[in-house]
Amino acid sequence: MKLLHITCSPRAQESHSARLAQAIVERLCAVHPAMQVQLRDLAAEPLPHVDGAYADALAGKAPVGTAAGALVRSDTLIAELVQADAIVLGTPMHNFTVPSALKSWIDHVLRIHRTFAPTPEGHKRGLLRNRPVYIAVAAGGMFLGERARQPDFLTPYLRAVFNTMGLHDLHFFVLQATVRGPEALAAAWDDALRQVARLAAPQPAPLELQD
């Protein structure tokens, strides 16, 4: 089995989201020892924003012979998704939503006719086969539950992104109030790690059919 591990915090392994995502990876490898892990570190190797050449290629307006080159990076990132039997994503919450590094990755992989297709009714149909996606989220404040004190545009956005591509088996692991003192942080870690400890082995995803 292949596991795609995506991380995007600028704080690298000092970040809570990266450490929680690593705990998830280690748990999945423990219950499935044959797991092969591929790391995509969006902070250490940031992706450029999509540019005019990319937009022209998608719209069919690129000069003859240039469209394929404009989409090479997108093709590579989509191939990583296609080849993965499971995905682990670690992300902090920045200004109520995803960091810019993760947004750039999303713009490259959420691509018409490759990971989703429009329907006659105006909806979007996912083209990727469903597989487990484990999402580790860390935030300094409280954004879920009765004690939430800030809006959450991150979890519904990521749910919409992955659902649009056909990925519906989503599992969120959340660390909240990471700046509210050592006791609150320790309690948040205890809750998250208990959830991680209950993870079972993911099932292999069916083979992908690509046009």
Image: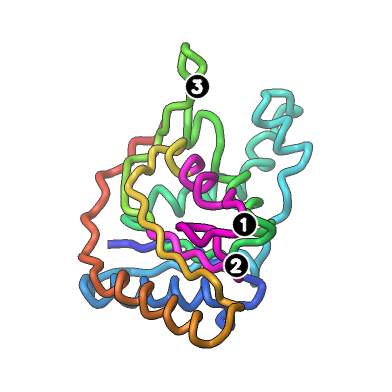
Label 1 crowd (10 A; few <14 / some 14-19 / many >=20):
few
Which residue was labeled with disc 3? 118
| Residue type pointed to by label 3 | Pro
Indicate whether 13 appears above or below 108. Answer: below
Q: Position of residue 55 (x, y in %)?
A: 71, 33
Which residue was labeled with disc 1? 150
Q: Work out which residue is located at the far top of the displayed protein and give it.
A: 120
Cα–Cα span, label 2 and label 3: 37 Å
Q: Secondary structure at mark 1?
A: loop
Q: Position of residue 112 (x, y in %)?
A: 55, 30
Of the residues under marks 2 and 3, which one precedes in the sequence?
Answer: 3
Q: Residue 200 falls in which quadrant of the image?
A: bottom left
Colouring of the image: rainbow
Cα–Cα span, label 1 and label 2: 7 Å
Of the residues under marks 1 and 2, which one precedes in the sequence?
Answer: 2
x 38%, y 55%: residue: 133
Mark 2 vs mark 3, foreground winner is: 2
x 43%, y 27%: residue: 125
**The stretch drawn in magenta includes residue 145:** yes
x 21%, y 73%: residue: 31
Left or right: where 123 falls relative to 201: right
Range of residues picked out in magenta? 134-161
Q: Position of residue 70 (x, y in %)?
A: 69, 41
Q: Secondary structure at mark 2?
A: loop
Please tell me the numbered disc located at residue 141. 2
- Residue in front for this viewpoint, 208 or 170: 170
| Residue type pointed to by label 1 | Gln
Position of the N terminus, as image quadrant, is bottom left
Indicate whether 179 appears above or below 113. Answer: below
| Residue type pointed to by label 2 | Gly
Of the residues under marks 1 and 3, which one precedes in the sequence?
Answer: 3
